[in-house]
Image (cartoon, rainbow, N blue to C red):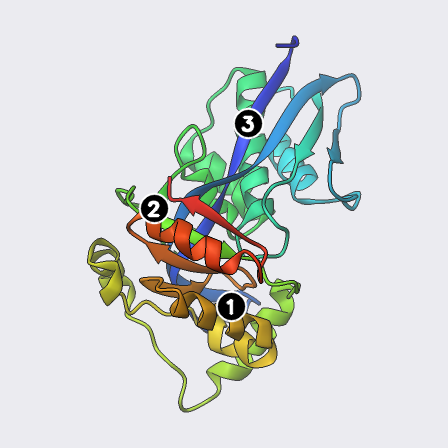
Amino acid sequence: RMLNVTYERAYAKVNFGLNVFSERGDGFHNIESIFQTVDLYDELMVSEIADNRCVVECDTFKLPEKNTLTNSYEAFCQVSMVKVPGVKVVLKKMIPSGGGLGGGSADAAALVRALQKICGIKLSASQLNQIAEKTGSDVFFFMNCDDEGKGCALVSGRGEVVKRIVPRTDLFLLLIFPELSSSTKEAYALVDEYLMKKDKVKGPGLLELEDIYRSDVKTWNLVNTFTPALSKKYKEIDAALMDLKKVGSEYVEMTGSGSTVFGVYTLEQQAISSYNLLAEFWNCKIARVV
């Protein structure tokens, strides 16, 4: 291990149910959801540099000058009140971007964990939330995960109200990554349009979410408000959902604002057989909840 190099894993998340409500007036939407991490992750290698800034190198694509990692670094410098060295982050990307899996937010929280180790400090919950406030709505959840960046929580408000719950560990997911990229901005525009409709589907409320999550997966009636809005525009999303149902997933939904779609299994063997049936047609991967 090299001197002064810190390694962190940034785990992806899925949403089990995601109720989205009409815009609040400050540009944000209230949501109600269960977020849980899965064992698909990005890797960050963080080393100290002489410059007092954050330099990011990514193995798959060129990140813009200002990105989630530089934002979380700057927020950390402001909030921590200690002298923070400059860092170089080498990011190995395994979580598809723009797939509703929270990759960028998970990376931001992982960098904060690394910076705490480098500076030898432990930030308070309210300091972590201040950093999330400056970095992005999904970051609140990741700041409330354990020291390895794993966790499960009921999330509401615009994402800042995070109530940790005991995670299930018996679920396997077959993730399908349709070849399309829908920006969060576009997804919310489609949702706003959808929320004006009379026949919109309403999912169970926040108080019921945990009981449903604990129950038999086959009986889940959790809803993601983004799904009908996006699957109408993008036929691939609809097709992926249909295919997962056909191969016997116990519950099928889209995560976040898309476009990743997943099927839930309680038996790993069934997830594997479904994968074998679909891998020829779809870019897909088995993940386990962690």
Position above or below: 234 against 115: below
Position above or below: 231 against 249: below
Tell me whether the residue at label 1 lies in contact with that at label 3, contact meaning CB atoms closer than 8 angstroms. Answer: no
Which amino acid is tagged 1?
Answer: Ala
Residue mark closest to the camera, 1 vs 2: 2
Q: Nearer the viewer, residue 178 or 100?
A: 178
Q: Residue at x 40, y 70 (%)?
A: 246
Which amino acid is tagged 3?
Answer: Glu
SS of the residue at dot 2?
helix
Write down the residue under mark 2.
Answer: 268
Q: Answer few, some or many: residues within 10 Å of disc 3's Cα (few below 14, many 20 plus, some between 14 and 19).
A: many
Q: Residue at x 37, y 39 (%)?
A: 290
Q: Mark 2 or mark 3: which comes first in sequence? A: 3
Q: Nearer the viewer, residue 185 or 120?
A: 185
Q: Mark 1 or mark 2: which comes first in sequence? A: 1
Write down the residue under mark 3.
Answer: 8
Which amino acid is tagged 2?
Answer: Glu
Relative to 203, 52 lies left or right: right
Q: Name the spot of residue 159 as percent of width and height, x first.
A: 45, 55
Write down the residue under mark 1.
Answer: 240
